[in-house]
Amino acid sequence: MERHIDLPLTEEIAETLRMGDTVYLSGVVYTARDAAHERMTEQLAQGIPIPFDTKDATIYYVGPSPARPGSVIGSAGPTTAGRMDKWAPQMIALGARGMIGKGARSKEVIDAMRRYHGVYFGAIGGAGALLSKCIVKSELIAYEDLGPEAIRKLTVREFPVTVLIDCEGRNLYEEGRRDYLKSRRQG
Amino acid sequence: MRQISTSLVKEAVERMCIGANVYLPEDMQEGIRAMRRKEDGAIAQTILDQIILNYEEAGREGVPICQDTGMACIFLEIGQEVHFTGDYLYDAIQEGVRCAYTKGYLRKSVEADPVRRGNTGDNTPAMIHTDIVPGDKVKITVAPKGFGSENMSALAMLKPSAGLAGVKDFILQTVEAAGPNPCPPIVVGVGIGGNFDQVALLAKKALLRPVDSRNEDPFYADLEDEMLEKINDLGIGPQGFGGRTTAVGVNIETLPTHIAGMPCAVNISCHVTRHETEVI
């Protein structure tokens, strides 16, 4: 099913998204990779709040290449999401509902998604040149010293993703492969 | 003795770092297009179309194909008749990388310390490998390598009794465990033999061979074909969403080894397998 969705990602909308849906996202997403997650966690322990509103937020696991003059951003495709599994359940518990990345997730993350109704979206890994065309604004909001790993507030328009794992825990990596192999055996 | 100024090496490295990150090599482009023609999975076809559009867009606009513009891996084949003049060779190479990643708007992805971290800010140091060869030329290959795929690579100190079957199992297990993470369709570089350190380098060097090339030894050429077929029977598919196209190529390189061992390394590379070569 094809969907066009405005962010932030509310619980009502998240519950309607199903594994395998093609979704075009518009609105604000926040970038964070390993180093930003590590620092947010350290700062939380010290009582310092996360540098953006986590409620219904979508976090894009990306470290873009630098913008050329006249461009909003450089190449900006997803990084491997599994590296953020250590911190993702906490971010989900804090209200972050959407994650954009690529690759497998842990049981702990999927359990948190089921409990809090989160969605894991996949963007095409290695398609950063194409994806960057859907990013219309980029603003560095925290951790500038982390370079490509700083937290950026991105405004995206019709950003193409696929629902990899939905809030019921259905997983495209498992079912997509199984369905393909089944069709091949029957074909 | 032929004199070569290291400033020429610096310029070549700078040029190739930018070029390799923006223009996907023709053998990879054709490899992906050929797999697209054979692909029978519906989602897989859509993903491959997007991947093709992406490298076309990058080349047209002069932007990096992927935001992970990699660690710069530099391979030198230096003719023993060459005498370098000017700055120290390795400094010149690092300067070429530094200039390319800054001027070329490439991502700086290198941490100064593996445990304590801290971005170096200019993507140096590059990883440099040097071979001394006959002649008076310098061959330089630049291969930016992303870590989504590097992280899914593996090395096994197989024992001789594991035999050919053990090698096949290890390759397949490594690709299976990598699943969707290394951005399939992948290229699989395999090193067999040598020792612990050389086998990993061998696997990386295997990735420098054109993806449509075959090992000169028919035994290993057949093994490459067989492994490619087996990998593409796994059903992982482009991006791991299911499909035939899991790998575009399998390149195997070998070295003699010790009577007690059969080291095997599998270096996985993504669909943005990049490298450029120049000869001075």
Image (cartoon, coloured by chain):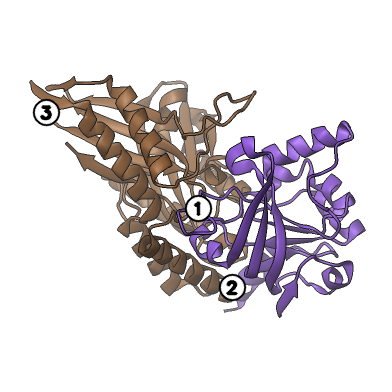
Chain colours: A purple, B brown
The residue depicted at 87 percent of the width and 62 percent of the height is: A117
x, y percent for residue A51: 78, 45
Task: Point out the tag, 2 or 3, that comes first from the N-terminus.
Answer: 2
Q: Measured along the vertical axis of the image, is residue B256 above or below residue B246? A: above
Examine the rendering and report whether any part of residue B268 can be seen.
yes
Q: Is mark 2 on a helix, strand or loop?
A: helix
The residue depicted at 47 percent of the width and 24 percent of the height is: B196
Q: In which quarter of the image is residue B11?
A: top left
Is B132 left or right of A76, judged from the image as shown? left
Q: Mark 2 points at which residue?
A: B43
Q: Mark 3 points at which residue?
A: B136
Chain containing the residue with disc 2: B
Q: Quadrant of residue A86?
A: top right
Q: In which quarter of the image is the N terminus of chain A?
A: bottom right
Chain containing the residue with disc 1: A
How many numbered circles does the render carry? 3
Q: How far apart are marks 1 and 2 (CA)?
A: 31 Å
Q: Distance between the residues labelled 2 and 3?
A: 51 Å
Q: Residues within 10 Å of mark 2 (few under 14, many from 20)?
A: some
- Front residue of B215/B246: it is B246
Q: What element carries label 3?
A: loop
Nearer mark to the viewer, of 1 and 2 = 1
Q: How crowded is mark 1: few (under 14 residues within 10 Å), some or many (20 or more)?
A: some
Amino acid at the residue labelled 2: Ile
Q: Measured along the vertical axis of the image, is residue A62 above or below residue B257? A: below
Amino acid at the residue labelled 3: Asp
Q: Mark 1 points at which residue?
A: A67
Chain containing the residue with disc 3: B
Q: Is mark 1 on a helix, strand or loop?
A: loop
